[in-house]
Amino acid sequence: MSSFGTDHRLDDIAVRDTRISDAIDEPMRAMILDILSEEALTATEVHERLENRGVDRTENTVRHHINELRDADLVDVVRFEEGRGGTTKYYHANTIVLSYSLPDSTDAAVEEMIDAVQPQITDALATLTDEYDDTIEEIVADMQPCEHCRTQKYETYVLLTILRRAFVRAHRDETQ
């Protein structure tokens, strides 16, 4: 029941992970993540790819943005190469950002696919809540900085994070 006194069906959940959204608040960082999702590159190579996309920034600025993404755990240093009196770092994205909207014309097809996978999702949620309820509660307790926050949807966020990461792992294994 909503606060307006009418029944309303929940259709979707938008997730805003503050660690991630703060890191990609700068549009160029989302481009860098996109570039680094394809292959491991140096900051110089990322700078060149950005220039090819028409982004005119200094290499130091690009390096700064890569470091911000690394500090947010969205990019990993995957390789070091020694040479020419220094060490070259190669970066690779471990997270992708999808900023799309489905066309309204796809509603029926999307609903059909939801109906097809919902039983498996229901089973997965039952497994998580039956077998890992105590662990989920511990995670939620660690997330709540104050008494007011107990009204937030932390359990839903934890469950979505688990399902999202499981999806990514399954998708990655499927495409390799």
Image: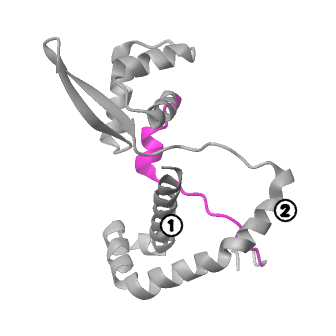
Q: Say whether residue 134 is left or right of residue 29.
A: left
Which residue is at a point 54% across and 14% down the rendered structure image? 52
Q: In the image, is residue 113 above or below residue 53?
A: below
SS under mark 1: helix
Query: Which residue occupies the foreground of this view, 172 or 25?
Result: 172
For disc 1, the marked residue is: 163
Which residue is at a point 57% across and 14% down the rendered structure image? 54
Q: Which residues are magenta?
A: 7-27
Q: Position of residue 14 (x, y in %)?
A: 60, 58
Which residue is at a point 59% across and 44% down the rendered structure image? 98
How crowded is the residue under tag 2: few (<14 C-alpha within 10 Å), some, or many (20+)? few
How crowded is the residue under tag 1: few (<14 C-alpha within 10 Å), some, or many (20+)? some
**What colouring style does the render use?**
one colour
Q: Position of residue 30 (x, y in %)?
A: 51, 34
Q: Earlier in the sequence, mark 1 or mark 2?
A: 2
The circle drawn on residue 108 is: 2
In the current view of this chain or complex, which residue is farthest to the bottom? 130
Check residue 161 for magenta coloring. Answer: no
Q: In the image, is residue 100 above or below residue 108?
A: above
Q: Position of residue 9 (x, y in %)?
A: 74, 74
User: As shown in the figure, which amino acid type bears the numbered disc 2?
Assistant: Ala
Q: In the image, is residue 104 above or below residue 66?
A: below
Check residue 16 for magenta coloring. Answer: yes
Tell me the chief SS of the magenta region.
loop
Q: Say whether residue 122 is left or right of residue 89.
A: right
Q: Position of residue 84 (x, y in %)?
A: 17, 11
In the current view of this chain or complex, which residue is farthest to the front? 176
User: Which quadrant would the N terminus be assigned to in this image?
Assistant: bottom right
Q: In the image, is residue 134 above or below residue 47?
A: below
Query: Which residue occupies the foreground of this view, 34 or 144?
Result: 34
User: As shown in the figure, which amino acid type bears the numbered disc 1?
Assistant: Leu
